[in-house]
Amino acid sequence: MRAITIPSFGGPEVLTLADIPQPELGPFDVLVQVAAAGLNHADLAQREGHYPPPAGAPDWPGMELSGTIIDTGDEVSRWNVGDRVCALVPGGAYAERAVVNEGLLLAIPDAVDLIEAAGIPEAACTVYANLYLTAGLKPGQSLLVHGGTSGIGSMAIQLAHALGNPVFATAGSAAKVAFCAELGATAINYRDEDFAEVIARNTGGTGVDAVLDIVGADYLERNVAALATGGAIVIIANQSGGPGTFDIGLLMRKRGRILASTLRARPLADRVAIVAEVERVVMPLFAIGEVRPIIDTVFPLADAGDAHRRMETSDHIGKILLAT
């Protein structure tokens, strides 16, 4: 089969379409004919040599996919050949076929396009796990999302809106601010305004109950300032790099929590449990159209380098996909 490989670390030009052996199907696995794979910033980090796949995962990149089951392991009972599925995987999605543990699969609702479904698993699992399972966000509590037009951000805004959480979102242009507002957020242009000051004005100084942060160190101090008493900051990336500083006393007075999380390297049982909760709570929202995958661009698999360049510009709104 063909897959995008990384013969050497570097820029987008190192991504190479190559013929590789098909992964071996285990008893609790299914074989998926991949329709599309979703891009994530972790893929860029892997390409640069900063984020190796966890033990046992394929060497080629890609953490989410959509497609059709073409074979099943001997112990698989729930899934059948021909089922339309999307999946959260620890690697190997940039390929024509992928072997996936049965517990990491999600059935694609009839209302969702097979290609676009590749933009669901990583964002839905990341958002739901971090905000609702880890931070414990409850209906009526408020949320701040950074990077509101990213795949993660656009999913977080929609899910918060659907589950009854007032949501603020930051973005870096007038067009992106308008898009966040269309999704249901109180949108803040971080280039023109201090998001902590905007939140203070809009909440009467109370702040937000949770912050979902993909920026990291540069936002830490203002995240604490924007936090409500008893709230939680969940950091899922550190795009700004380096260490961050904040007022520990203020965090203590607010009885706040700072949490950090990755999804890819968690034990299989943890990832299966998260996928099960997403199936229970989130996928029905896709079925009725209340939440939808936001797709920026679909590139052919062979053009993975161009897809990575698109992501590196930060001009995209929603997910970037590779179609096989």
Image (tube, rainbow, N blue to C red):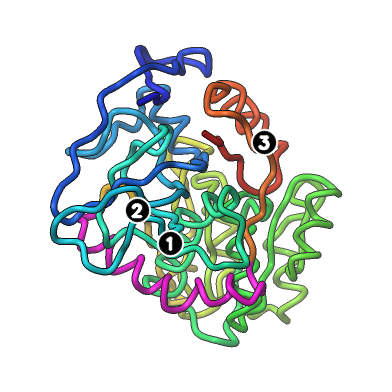
Indicate the amino acid at tag 3. Ser
Mark 2 or 1, nearer chain start: 1
Q: Nearer the viewer, mark 2 or mark 1?
A: 1
Residue 289 in the image: x percent, y percent? Answer: 66, 72
Q: Say whether residue 123 is magenta.
A: no
**Quarter holding residue 101:** bottom left
Report whether residue 104 is seen. yes
Real-space CA distance between mark 3 and mark 1, rounded to the nearest whole angstrom: 22 Å
Residue pointed to by mark 1: 125
Residue pointed to by mark 2: 263
Q: Residue furthest bottom?
A: 140
Residue 271 in the image: x percent, y percent? Answer: 29, 60
- In the image, residue 252 sits, relative to residue 40, either above or below, namely below
Q: Provide the major secondary structure of the magenta segment.
A: helix
- In the image, residue 59 sits, relative to residue 225, either above or below, namely above
Q: Say whether residue 269 is magenta.
A: yes
Mark 3 or 2, nearer chain start: 2
Indicate the amino acid at tag 2. Leu
Q: Residue at 17%, 56% (x, y): give it.
A: 28
User: Which structural element holds mark 2?
Assistant: loop
**Quarter holding residue 249:** bottom left
Q: Residues within 10 Å of mark 2 (few under 14, many from 20)?
A: some
Residue pointed to by mark 3: 314
Residue 84 in the image: x percent, y percent? Answer: 46, 58
Real-space CA distance between mark 2 and mark 1, rounded to the nearest whole angstrom: 8 Å
Q: Residue at 37%, 74% (x, y): give it.
A: 277
Q: Which residues are the magenta region?
A: 266-291
